[in-house]
Image (spheres, rainbow, N blue to C red):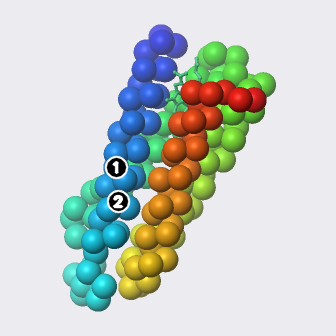
């Protein structure tokens, strides 16, 4: 059971990374004037997917902390903080894009990618 969860956690983390990179790319290529129709279905889908998938990775991680006795491992808690930071940066990035602040939206989306890269390294290296 634990092995299956570890596989799912890693697999979903990969998907979260692809979707977050996708969101960052969509922000980067978004037209500067905000369309009156609001975000496109593609933007909505990729944004929602990136946020939902990362949340799922965090939830699975929490369950694994309980099951695998990782509560004393600092890397897991820093990972959790990074998941929260990913969510906050994502929500702000979406709002910034909707208000036409494209550069700000891009920086925030890049921050999201960074949180995932850092989490990934933490999980594999387990430095503390
Ligand atoms: C989006 C952020 C995250 C990413 C990208 C991520 C990614 C990964 C990856 C790739 C592994 C496998 C490492 C290996 O094979 O050695 C892993 C393991 C693990 N993750 Fe995460 N993770 C994230 C968030 C979290 C959170 C928030 C928690 C807990 C609250 C957590 C708990 C764990 C634990 C306990 C392991 C170790 C499992 C083991 O080696 O048996 N992860 N994570």
Q: Left or right: where does residue 67 sit relative to residue 99?
A: right
Q: Which mark is residue 19?
A: 1
Q: Left or right: where does residue 75 sit relative to residue 26?
A: right
Q: Residue at horizontal 69%, vertical 41%?
A: 78
Residue 75, how many percent across, how many down? 69, 33
Q: Name the foreground residue: 101 vs 51.
A: 101
The residue tagged 2 is 23
Residue 18, how many percent across, how many down? 34, 45
Q: Residue at horizontal 50%, vertical 56%?
A: 112
Q: Does 9 appear above or below 110?
A: above
Residue 121, how many percent across, how many down? 57, 36
Mark 1 surroundings within 10 Å by alpha-carbon count, few (fewer than 14), some (14 through 19), many (20 or more): many
Instruction: Please report contact status of discs 1 and 2: CB closer than 8 Å, yes or no.
Output: yes
Residue 124, how many percent across, how many down? 57, 27
* Residue 62 visible in the current orientation: no
Q: Quadrant of residue 96?
A: bottom left
* Residue 9 visible in the current orientation: yes
Q: Residue at horizontal 51%, vertical 46%?
A: 116
Q: Name the foreground residue: 113 vs 38.
A: 113
Q: Quadrant of residue 86?
A: bottom right
| The quarter of the picture showing ligand 1 | top right
- Mark 2 element type: helix
Q: Left or right: where does residue 79 sit relative to residue 27?
A: right
Q: Residue at horizontal 40%, vertical 43%?
A: 16
Q: Which mark is residue 98?
A: none
Mark 2 surroundings within 10 Å by alpha-carbon count, few (fewer than 14), some (14 through 19), many (20 or more): many
On whether ligand 1 comes within 8 Å of the CB at mark 1, the answer is no
Q: Does 37 appear above or below 110?
A: below
Q: Does 59 appear above or below 24?
A: above
- Mark 1 element type: helix
């Amino acid at each position: 059971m634990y092995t299956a969860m570890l596989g799912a956690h890693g697999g979903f983390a990969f998907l979260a990374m692809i979707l977050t990179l996708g969101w960052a790319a969509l922000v980067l290529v978004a037209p500067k004037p905000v369309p009156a129709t609001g975000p496109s279905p593609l933007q909505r889908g990729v944004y929602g997917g990136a946020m939902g998938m990362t949340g799922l990775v965090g939830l699975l991680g929490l369950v694994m902390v309980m099951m695998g006795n990782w509560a004393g491992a600092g890397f897991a808690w820093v990972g959790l903080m990074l998941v929260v930071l990913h969510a906050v940066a994502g929500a702000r990035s979406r709002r910034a894009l909707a208000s036409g602040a494209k550069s700000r939206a891009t920086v925030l989306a890049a921050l999201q990618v960074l949180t995932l890269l850092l989490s990934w390294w933490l999980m594999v290296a387990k430095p503390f």
